[in-house]
Image (spheres, helix red, strand yellow):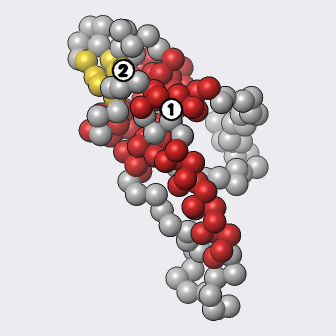
Amino acid sequence: MESILRISDAAAIGFHAMCYLAEADSKHPVSAVTMATELGVSEAHLSKVLQRLGREQLVTSRRGPGGGFTLAKPASDVRLFDIYDAVEGPLPQGECLLGKEECVLGPCIMGSVLNDVHTQVAHYLKHTTLQDLMDRRVPIRCVRPRMAVGAE
């Protein structure tokens, strides 16, 4: 079952990593290895995401023993839009659900819905902080991707 809201793996890792760091003690950096293990994600992918977040000064890193990552500023000062933009770049505009360049039906039949959803998502990301996200957590069923028949 797919979610109606599609967010790239990189953006999802970015949001989760930032939440993980928001919960961690800011005096003790968290290693990428620890975070990747706890989040159940690829260390290589997480490291790339953390580099992007670092370039945008959302996280700081310290090398060496006892090193790792911390939030660069309080969770209440980090907008979700900042995280998304650091990881993915500009928020995409509505695109054809069928992936077509031009619709045979003329103007897009889903255009108004896509524009409305895009506007609402952009507004949410721009007006919600990392702290808001942490405060509003609700249980959700996590579904792991099914393995193909015969896959190991």
At which x and y percent is residue 69?
Answer: 35, 21
The front one of 3 and 137 is: 137
- The residue sitting at 58% across, 62% down in the picture is 118
Report the number of discs: 2
Is residue 139 visible in the rendered image? The answer is yes
* Residue at mark 2: 70
Type of amino acid at the residue the image marks with label 1: Leu
- The residue sitting at 50% across, 67% down in the picture is 93
- Few, some or many C-alpha atoms within 10 Å of disc 1 (few <14, some 14-19, many ≥20)? many
Quadrant in which residue 27 is drawn? top left
Mark 1 or 2: in front is 1
On screen, residue 97 versus residue 21, left or right, reads right
Q: Earlier in the sequence, mark 1 or mark 2?
A: 2
- Few, some or many C-alpha atoms within 10 Å of disc 2 (few <14, some 14-19, many ≥20)? many
At which x and y percent is residue 77?
Answer: 42, 31
Type of amino acid at the residue the image marks with label 2: Thr
Q: Quadrant of the C terminus?
A: top right
At which x and y percent is residue 105?
Answer: 68, 91
- The residue sitting at 63% across, 92% down in the picture is 106
The front one of 107 and 68 is: 107
Q: Calculate the distance from the C-alpha at mark 1 to the C-alpha at mark 2.
A: 14 Å
The label number, if any, that marks residue 130 in the structure image: 1
| Above or below for 38 versus 81 | above
Quadrant in which residue 136 is drawn? top right
Quadrant in which residue 26 is drawn? top left
On screen, residue 82 versus residue 113, left or right, reads left
On screen, residue 49 versus residue 109, left or right, reads left
- Name the element at disc 1: helix
At which x and y percent is residue 151?
Answer: 66, 41
- The residue sitting at 45% across, 21% down in the picture is 21
On screen, residue 143 versus residue 117, left or right, reads right
